[in-house]
Amino acid sequence: MEPKDTTLNEAYKGFTNSNCPFLPCHQGIKREFNCLFCYCPLIAYECPGPYELYTDRNGLVRKNCTACTLPHDGYHASWNFIQKWLAKPVPWAGHPQTRRRR
Ligand code: SF4
């Protein structure tokens, strides 16, 4: 098996599950729909996505990521986005989104 930093095959960066009954689960995707990050790795970390807040049945404040396309828009772009934000993860403080979308 080739190490990721030497292979030219980028198939590991994403895929589209065209059989999923929820596809398209986010609107506004312009490139390939990447399902690899269906459960976003940044859900528990600070992120630049346009999330809203809601309170779940256990009283926990959580992110509603319905409007976010960042982990899904293009295999290459979404892979790079997730790698960048996981390089120095900062635990999410539970605050409303104040970042501008990148
Ligand atoms: S807002 Fe986007 S980047 Fe942030 S946790 Fe939700 S899906 Fe991930």
Image (tube, rainbow, N blue to C red):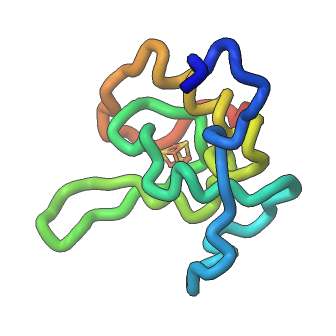
Residue found at the very far left of the displayed protein = 58
User: Could you say which quadrant of the image residue 11 lies in?
Assistant: top right
The residue at 68%/33% (across/down) is 100
Task: Name the image quarter holding the N terminus.
Answer: top right
Query: Residue at left 40%, top 20%?
Result: 89
Q: Residue furthest right?
A: 30
Q: Is residue 37 above or below residue 10?
A: below
The residue sitting at 62% across, 40% down in the picture is 12
Quarter occupied by the C terminus: top right
Query: In the rendering, at what x and y percent does residue 92 appear?
Result: 34, 32
Tally the marks: 0
Q: Is residue 6 left or right of residue 62?
A: right
Residue 71 drawn above or below residue 66? above
Pick the residue in front: 37 or 14.
14
Q: Where does the image place residue 75, in percent across and percent down from the top left?
A: 73, 44
Apparent side of residue 32 relative to residue 98 in the rendered image (left or right) = right
Quadrant of the image occupied by residue 81: top right
Residue in front for this viewpoint, 8 or 47: 8
> Residue 42, percent across and down?
44, 38
Of all residues shown, which one is farthest toward the front?
A: 1
Residue displayed at 86% across by 53% down = 31
**Taking 20 as reference, is 94 left or right?**
left
**As drawn, 84 above or below 101:** above
- The picture places residue 84, in percent across and down from the top left corner, at 59, 20
